Image (cartoon, rainbow, N blue to C red):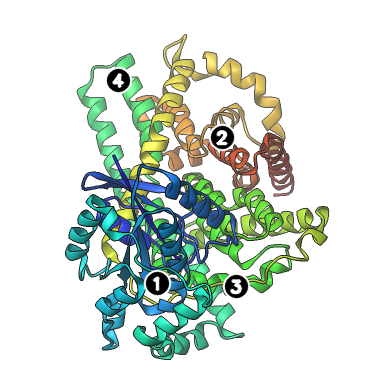
Amino acid sequence: MKNIILVGKPNSGKSLLFNQLTGMRQKVANFPGVTVELKSGKFDEYKLIDYPGTYSLKSLSKDEELAIEKLHEAMHSDDTSLIVCNLDATRLERSLVFGLQVRDLAFKHNKGVIFALNMIDEVQRFSHHIDTDKLAKDLGCAVYALSAKTLIGLHEFKLGLIDAAKHPQDFIPNKTNDTQTTVLEISRELSARYGIKADVVLKQQNSIDNFLLNSVFGGLIFLTIMFLLFQSIFTWASPLMDAVETAMTELAMLSSQVLPAGVVNDFVSDAMFGGVGSFLVFVPQIMVLTLIIGLLEDSGYLARAALICHKPLSYFGLSGRSFIPYLSGHACAIPAIMAARTIESPRKRLITMMTIPLMSCSARLPVYALLIAVLIPDTQYLGGLINLQGITFFILYFIGIATALLVSTLLTKMTDIDKDKAEMPFILELPTYRLPHWKPLIHRVLTSAKQFIRRAAPVIFMVSVVIWVLGYFPENGNLQSSYLASIGQWIEPIFEPLGLDWRYGVAILVSFLAREVFVGALGTLFGIEGADENIAGLAANIQQDGLALGAGIGLMLFYVVALQCVATVATIKGETGSAKIAWGLFVGYGLLAYFLAWIAASLI
């Protein structure tokens, strides 16, 4: 199968075009540097490969370095049939700088090239027309005007793409850069001739930026948005969570009535509904978190947030570009660590990657939600818009961020600042404000829930089965005399100073596989202990058991800081190339988490 290579500058609609061509649902966002790895999908009889966005063939960051290296490899490969260069029609000059370089590189290696003039709907909105025939003549390559969002011109582009891929020799550029004229000068000249004037496009954007980036109001708006983000995770998801919990309870009761009394009935009630069912209750929160972050991404606000955060983050040895991996880390640490490749400074990139695990990822949501439901009353404010449980959520997230900044400061002081004296200044392209493309956004929300369940459910099921077998036997449900109790009582002295008994110790230990396993493990343990008469929600069971306030708060602090995720450890090792750093973070954050939990249990 021959390859078609898709390249272009960041934030030019390239990933959305890739989605439309392949039918895949790659993450689409409205800020620079969102794509940090190669994505591939099938288009017609070809493999379409989406490369990380880059502004030039001279790399400024690790993801650009990857894109350029792979692009050169593709130019030398016989498997490469065609190069598709995506251009932003609203910012033609910036797109053409890279586009012209790609054209010249393709000419040098005898490869066909076509240009996709994307976001043409934005240009048409300002009643501007781009003569693609004349632009194609000046570029020496075919140019197709289209909008990956509104599908304008997409059908014609697909037909042209198939033709070009089948006959790439007919699409080799017929002109290259004049050595007396720089690429920048040519791109500026072509943009002046065909592109829309920048002040027309930026007029509305600047008026909004004058408010959102105001030195006084900008910071307040940012803090308000972040507060509402974390508040919404609890308040917006509550009705769905209640519905899922009710469904799980009804199904548990139904299965208990249908199945005959005995081992099978106990297994279904305790391991299936007590373990896996307890975890499913918190999936709606993952969906709400993905939705809110998606709205911020697609609207173009995240780039502004990175700009707002640059100066404060610089005090802690970080860059404004660290904000985007940090916020992404609240969904999942693994892609967030990979997104840190966009940070130009190697030192700041490493520090960002090392502190991303302190961001409260979606796997912590079930743990937080469970413990908050147990310990914090549902006190309402402002007519139910804000509640005490949501505020507690925000505080937990804030503690994680504050700890990350503190660790960043310490790491900065421990490293050689002189290494960064020659680093480039902070430069970030501010995309135009856009309404979200709802179809991929909703698909992303549903996919996040599916992936979370697909990733976590098998692990939770296996752990629940093992815990149930060890906790049920040898006396058919007597937890206190079970094999698991013997193991738990052996490790209980480690967790006793935290005010926790052996059941919580077992749940903590197995949650290294994935943090959310903690909820499933406790669900199984309390299910065995409660037997058939106790099939209420897990939070209610823990409340009846009498978890102390200090121990509960300590447990929340433990999960804020502890690196309880083997996949994250593996990703850090892969990105840094150092097992010492990866396992050092695991041990260091684990000890710090234990210390904070002990302080909370002792003082509260």
Provide the secondary structure element on which disc 2 rests.
Answer: helix
The residue wearing badge 3 is 427
Provide the secondary structure element on which disc 1 rests.
Answer: helix
Specify few, some or many for label 3: CA neighbours under 10 Å numbering under 14, 14-19, or 20 or more: few
Which badge, 1 or 3, is on the more N-terminal residue? 1
The three-letter code of the residue at mark 2 reads Val
Q: Quadrant of residue 223?
A: bottom right
Camera-nearest residue between 89 and 30: 89
Numbered mark located on residue 265 in the image: 4
Q: Are marks 4 and 1 in contact (CB under 8 Å)?
A: no
Which badge, 4 or 2, is on the more N-terminal residue? 4
The residue wearing badge 2 is 566
Which badge, 4 or 1, is on the more N-terminal residue? 4
Which badge, 4 or 3, is on the more N-terminal residue? 4
The three-letter code of the residue at mark 4 reads Asn
Which residue is at 34% across, 76% downward? 138
In the rendered image, residue 555, in percent from the top left (x then y), is placed at: 61, 43
Side of 79 where 480 appears, left or right:
right
Specify few, some or many for label 2: CA neighbours under 10 Å numbering under 14, 14-19, or 20 or more: some
As measured in the structure, the alpha-carbon distance from the residue carrying label 4 to the one carrying label 1 is 50 Å
Provide the secondary structure element on which disc 3 rests.
Answer: loop
Q: Are marks 4 and 3 in contact (CB under 8 Å)?
A: no
The residue wearing badge 1 is 299
Q: Is residue 83 above or below residue 593?
A: below
Q: Is residue 513 above or below residue 61?
A: above
